[in-house]
Every structure is written in structure tokens, then in C-alpha cells.
Image (cartoon, helix red, strand yellow):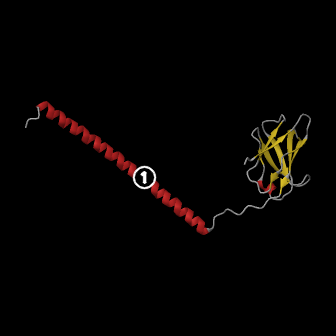
Amino acid sequence: MSNIITATFADGDTSVVTAEQYMYARGQILKVEGLELPSVYRVNFSNSPTGDSKTQIGTADGVIIPDVYFVSGKPIYAYIMLTSGEDREIKYDITIPILNATEPEDDTPTEEQASVINQAINALSDAITALNEATTRVGEAVEKMETLTFRINEVGELISQTGGED
């Protein structure tokens, strides 16, 4: 599921309506297409066309829509604010219709679940430590075997040079 909501303006449009979105969405980004916007611009979000709003900063990558606007079940209104000198003008507006949805369950773990998660993390950490220690011991054993192999080869060469005599 994508977290990008696209608002596409056709030539001459100053107002658009996006595809419907579900309540309780999180981490949504509004991407504006079809407009020549500055590299950084203001967007005011509200659940009412005339109510209080929250200002966010938009870039070429889009603008993050505050999650709080997805919980009321009301449309989200976004007003792109362009500034020229001291004056602020609303140049473009976007309406994001909201579909009712069941509120997701709270996914915060209980104390018991958090304890189990912490035990699992500690066990995994202990296993990783043991694996690292075993890897070190294997490396040391390989070095010793290489040294012994070298010595055995040296002894073998000495024996072959002396003809195997005692």
C-alpha cells in the first residue's frame, strides 16, 4: 500500500480533488503534479475549509500530511501557500476525501508482551555473542592447523633429504 497521495492539476486548475483515502492512515505524503512550484513552499492542512490549519513545508518530494487529519472522518483540505514579499496568497487548494474505516487496534505491546520481546532480544544477542566467540576460536584453530601443517611438511622434507635414515 502506497503512502503517496497524488494531486494532479491540469492547465489552469486552481483546485483539485484527489482519490479517496481511508481514515487512520499514517505517514501519508501529498505529491503535487502539474504545477510549477518553487523548490520549497507552504501547505496548510485542515479538516475544515475555514477552520484552524497546520502549516507544513513542501518540497519537490512532496509534503507530509499530519496524521491527526486522518482521524476525524472529514475531508482534508490542503492549501498551497506561495509567498511574494510580505503578502501570503492561497494559490491552489486540494481536497482529500476520507472514507470511514475501523480504527486499528492499539499495537503497543502489553508489559507481558514487552517482557517476552526483551527476552527474545536478549537471547538473540547472547546467541550472536556466542557465534562471534566461536568464529574467533575457529579462526585460531585454523591458524594452529596451518602452523602444524607447515611443520609437518618441513619434517617431511627433512626426512626426504636425509633419505629416511635414522
Indicate left or right for 94 with 65 as reference: right
Indicate left or right for 160 with 43 as reference: left
Question: Which quadrant would residue 149 be assigned to in this image?
Answer: top left
Give the residue at x 60% y 66%: 113
- Which residue sits furthest top? 161
How far from the left and from the top, in percent, is residue 12? 92, 35
Q: Amino acid at mark 1?
A: Leu
The residue tagged 1 is 131
Which residue is more in the foreground, 161 or 27?
A: 161
- Which residue sits furthest left? 166
Give the residue at x 81% y 35%: 38
Question: Which quadrant would residue 31 be assigned to in this image?
Answer: top right
Q: Secondary structure at mark 1?
A: helix
Which residue is more in the foreground, 121 or 55?
A: 121
- Taking 17 as reference, is 124 above or below it? below
Quarter of the rendering occupied by the C terminus: top left
How far from the left and from the top, in percent, is residue 77? 87, 50
How far from the left and from the top, in percent, is residue 89? 90, 42
Q: Residues within 10 Å of mark 1 (few under 14, many from 20)?
A: few
- How many marks are shown on the rendered structure? 1
- Taking 9 as reference, is 54 above or below it? below
How far from the left and from the top, in percent, is residue 103? 76, 61
Give the residue at x 77% y 42%: 62
